[in-house]
Amino acid sequence: MHNPEIKTALSVLAAHLAERPVTTRREFSSDPGRFSALHIVFEDMLFDYSKQCIVPQTLGLLAALAKAADIEEKREAMFRGDLINTTEKRAVLHTALRNMSGEPVYVEGRDVMPEIAAERRKLYAFAADVREGRLRGSLGQPMTDIVNIGIGGSDLGPAMATKALEPFAAPGLRAHFVSNVDGADIGDTLKGLDPSRTLFIISSKTFTTQETMTNARSARSWIADALGEAAVIDHFAAVSTKLDKVAEFGIDATRVFGFWDWVGGRYSIWSSIGLPLAIMIGGAAFDEFLSGAHEIDQHFRGQPILSNIPMMMGLISVWNRNILGYASQAVIPYDQRLSRFPAYLQQLQMESNGKSVTKQGDATDMATGAVIWGEPGTNGQHAFFQLLHQGTEIVPVDFLVAAEPTNADRHHHDLLVANCFAQAEALMHGRTGEEAQALMISQGMDPQEAARLRPHKTFSGNRPSSTFLYSRLNPRILGRLIALYEHKVFVEAAIWGINAFDQWGVELGKELASRLAPIVATPSQTTSDLDSSTAHLIEHLRSLRGQA
């Protein structure tokens, strides 16, 4: 059962909505100060939530919800290093990885900052050796291609960030990311690469992850076949805590980088998992990336609820999910380099808050994590924006856009920004049937035809969105954006009473896949113990393969 104070606060919010239904178009028309009351500025970043379906009076009720959920104390417990991941009895301290203050951070009475600093120095030294051509392959060639092999948090974070920060990458270096166990992924990646100039990074904490190790063994064979078995040691590095398994694979201990069990996979980009990013952009830029996130940590800890961006992001998300009943949210970056950001947030938010039991193990009695999805604008405008504007499901949207382009044409960027602002305005404002009909007639259309088309060109509006506007995409801003969404997830989980830091939901399918793998691979294996659907699928598979 959820905290009765939280239930009461949510009931008050629901009653508030019933008494004061919001039409954002009307609210903007009647309240010239609406934007001033419903936005937050943090240095060169603006968070505009004035197009959400709330009114200024809603804010006090949202703050009361935060107080009822005791979010501020739960937040301090996380930063203190308390074991808030209760199912795994672990601290949650990804924030320590970007702690740039010099202050100690304790886990079970031990300051972990010295070992974090030592691991980072080692990471940066290795990254510099690769960037500057000192680390060479078995034939004495500098590396030109870095291939990261991982999955989940060991792939999505570094892949997203490396693409986002491509303008800051070292010339002559290329980064590639392999995650899918589908052999096409690694096969297509390796086409055209020179083995003598390729460095593989195997990212797996346990060095047992099925997909990662399958791909790693394929990469090892590719190097050994091209350069000889002795070359393996020169072309591999690892991010792992299992030194014995890494050594057995053939990776030198000096090329192994670790992290800690209080770092969750989807929160690990700040750790050694960020090695491919550090190689591409260098240690100084990686420090900027960490600093941006640390600035948001300080903002999250230090600002009152209503002037706290991640706090308001989380509270608005709960309003949309639990009061308005919206089951999904789109994230639309108007920046091609952030094309992988929605996918990154899918894992961050859906793996964290896709839970149906509370921290106490009871079934939750309220809706939890929304479905997160999105693509870059303007491409999305010519794909799924039809549904956003006129579909039967209302989908709140986060828009992200920079004021200035990074290594891009200004004319292109002006059009990009105009489209971003226009979409947010259109979702909020809509167009009435009368307006649509009058516009068609003013453009010379026959009045009867205009009347016929009127319902098709009517937009309801009142579809909520928030907009993040910042100076330009760089390492510091990217760090800030990621940290904002991390803390948003924390706020949601604190209200829903769930553990955002475990992921037991991914285990069952993996266990069953391990059981089915030898049955799929070996035609003589019986299917008698399987359900009839799975058994017949395997039988048909064997028939298609000529193994029946």
Image (spheres, grey):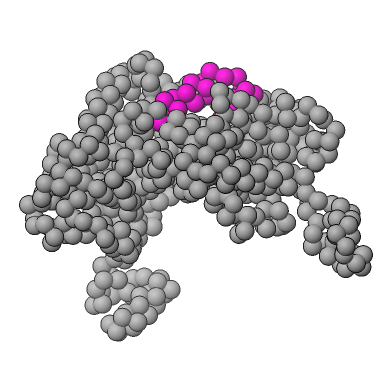
Q: Position of residue 276 (x, y in %)?
A: 30, 42
Quarter occupied by the C terminus: bottom left
Q: Position of residue 446 (x, y in %)?
A: 90, 67
Q: Position of residue 369 (x, y in %)?
A: 55, 44
Residue 512 visible in this rendered orientation of the protein: yes
**In magenta stretch: residue 299:** yes
**Count of numbered marks:** 0
Question: Which residue is more in the foreground, 462 or 172?
Answer: 172
Q: Is residue 348 left or right of residue 168?
A: right
Question: Which residue is more in the foreground, 159 or 350?
Answer: 159
Q: Is residue 125 left or right of residue 318?
A: left
The residue located at (48%, 39%) in the rendering is 406
**In magenta stretch: residue 415:** no
The residue located at (10%, 50%) in the rendering is 139
The residue located at (40%, 28%) in the rendering is 288
Q: Is residue 280 left or right of residue 477?
A: left
The region drawn magenta spans 289-310
Relative vertical location of residue 76 with respect to residue 240 in this rendering, above or below? above
Relative vertical location of residue 301 with respect to residue 410 in this rendering, above or below? above
Quarter occupied by the N terminus: top right
Residue 289 falls in image quadrant: top left
